[in-house]
Image (cartoon, helix red, strand yellow):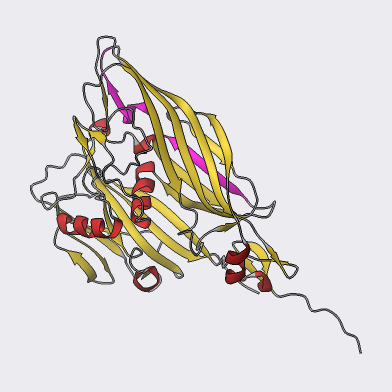
Amino acid sequence: MTTGTATPAKLTLQGVDVPAASINKAAFFALTRRKRNTEYSRAFAGHGNTDNIELRKADILAGIHVRFSGTLTVALGGGTAATTMRWPHDLLRTAKFTANGQSNLINCSGAKLKVREQLANGDISDRGVPQIFGAATVNQGTLSMASESWGVGTGGTAIAGGTYNVDLYWYVPVAEDHKDLAGAIFAQTSTMDLTLSLEWESAANLFVTTGAATMVLAGNVIVETEKYSIPMNGGLMVVPDLSLYHSLIQTRVATGVSNGDNELRLIGQGAGKQLLRIIYQTWNGAGAAAVPLAANATNYGQQGWRYSSNETPELFTDGRSLREWNERCANADIGAIFGFLCHDFASINAFRDAVDMGQTSELRALINIGAGVVLTSPAVEYVQETVFSAGSGG
């Protein structure tokens, strides 16, 4: 009678074959070690350009930290200098993260990354962090940390000539959180593709100058990754549950946005997807003159979400009501300056409250814009935060 050693059962997770016996969440968290390393440090590529970064293939990738550190030099030359409401957070026009053929796991602007961090991490708060909004100093709603420096304010006019220090930070959340690492990426293979693309906004969308005035931004871009080592236990590598991807996808709707009810059909519905958040703001105005509508009861009527024919599980009376709920969940007033609102299904209990996108047909965001708001080239920018199956099989 012939005997032999059975081949260990394997699962395909995130496109990688992993021995089933290696998946041991408790052992992984007991044995792993957190790591943080600099992956990229280069001079700023310049407005309208892109930094493409191939991340190192090692460990379990949980998050990416992006920093810009430099100066903004304003020379008036008899003209004037101002900033738009895209400055400073949307200096990062788009952060795109791709892993192992899953294109655009992350695809959204810097401001959306900032507000998502406030929503997902209640320990981070912008309360008491002074920054300049227009001609006034504000102490909350800036989406800023005390360690950051804008150099000059957002929506500022009559900016004085000089050289201003600028230090900005964005967090790209590869994993949904760092406690259970849902959505973290298995990076310990040479065949894995891990690419981060940082697209920088044009100067025309950040700065407004007249006459001979110039506003010149220079500095360095630093990218650090946060990873977790893959330990060995009983001769096998040990990994956590890698059955999910985490995604943040931004969409801009500039057609058909008007006063009254706007029902925006959410893209990408399908089986296995769980919706964690819908983050949105409405921009009003053309080009550099565009400003986000403040989240209040004048600008916004009822806010909610719907599916099927007309089922509306949540309906907030107006923008003020939803803004108050967001502040309660996030410990930050995200609607005060940059006009963000959010339907948040994750902050209290994601496993209970997340919306199954495979079971809710025709999922839509209901955004009512007040009848008295004068609209000029309005556009809604929204981000869907989801987790979805990374695929598995024997």
Indicate whether 238 appears above or below 65: below
Extent of the magenta region: 193-211
Name the outermost residue toward the top.
78
Q: Quadrant of residue 267?
A: bottom left
Name the outermost residue toward the left.
372
Q: Quadrant of residue 68?
A: top left
Q: Measured from the top left, where is residue 120 in percent x and y?
A: 37, 57
Tell me, yes or no, if residue 270 can be seen here: no
The quadrant of the rendering that contains the N terminus is bottom right
Q: Measured from the top left, where is residue 354 in percent x and y?
A: 36, 69
The quadrant of the rendering that contains the C terminus is bottom right
Left or right: 324 in relation to 7? left
Name the outermost residue toward the right.
1
Tell me, yes or no, if residue 279 can be seen here: yes
Indicate whether 228 appears above or below 285: below
Count of labels in the image: 0
Residue drawn at the location 24% of the way across and 55% of the way down: 327
Left or right: 35 in relation to 344? right
Pick the residue in front: 319 or 350.
350
Residue drawn at the location 50% of the way across and 63% of the way down: 182
Q: Is 160 in the magenta?
A: no
Residue drawn at the location 40% of the way across and 32% of the way down: 167
Q: Measured from the top left, where is residue 190 in percent x and y?
A: 70, 51
Name the outermost residue toward the bottom.
1
Q: Is 196 in the magenta?
A: yes
Left or right: 267 in relation to 198? left
Left or right: 256 in relation to 105? left
